[in-house]
């Protein structure tokens, strides 16, 4: 427990910024109109592609088991997000095609 409190005290500014970013992200996403969802999802897919590359690089330089697990988890979750985003985008664009 002492290590946790020491880590928190050393990195409190960064932790504070992450917490504020989470709340800001939730607030922004909750106010996006449905018409803008597809373009934003495509942009998020591009960003998560960069996240996946970064996670792979970090995973390659991991020294501890915990870092390997977190890196692998980051790659898996980023990949799921990209694939899910492309599926949603494809389904949304399918709605605009002419019926035969």
Image (cartoon, rainbow, N blue to C red):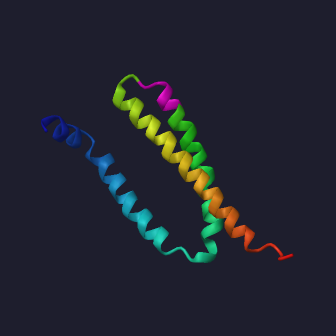
| Res 23 → quadrant | bottom left
- In what quadrant of the picture does the C terminus appear? bottom right
Q: Main secondary structure of the magenta part?
A: helix
- Identified at 64% across, 59% down, the residue is 87
- In what quadrant of the picture does the N terminus appear? top left
In this view of the protein, which residue sits in the foreground, 47 or 17? Answer: 47
Does 96 sit left or right of 70 as displayed? right
Question: How far across and down, in percent of the image, does residue 13 sit?
Answer: 29, 48
Direction left: furthest residue: 2
- Identified at 58% across, 56% down, the residue is 84
Question: How far across and down, in percent of the image, does residue 3 sit?
Answer: 17, 34
Task: Judge whether residue 58 is colored magenta.
Answer: yes
Q: Is residue 17 above or below residue 63?
A: below
Q: Is residue 69 above or below residue 15?
A: above
- Identified at 56% across, 46% down, the residue is 79
Does 71 sit left or right of 35 as displayed? left
Direction front: furthest residue: 100
- Identified at 47% across, 24% down, the residue is 61
Does 46 sit left or right of 6 as displayed? right
- Magenta-drawn segment: 57-62
């Amino acid at each position: 427990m002492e290590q946790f409190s020491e880590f928190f005290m050393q990195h409190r500014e960064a932790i504070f910024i992450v917490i504020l970013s989470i709340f800001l992200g939730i607030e922004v996403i909750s106010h996006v109109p449905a018409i803008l969802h597809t373009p934003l999802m495509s942009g998020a897919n591009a960003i998560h592609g960069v996240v996946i590359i970064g996670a792979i690089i970090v995973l390659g330089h991991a020294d501890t088991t915990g870092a390997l697990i977190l890196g692998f988890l980051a790659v898996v979750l980023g990949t799921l997000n990209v694939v899910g985003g492309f599926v949603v985008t494809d389904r949304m664009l399918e709605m605009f095609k002419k019926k035969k």
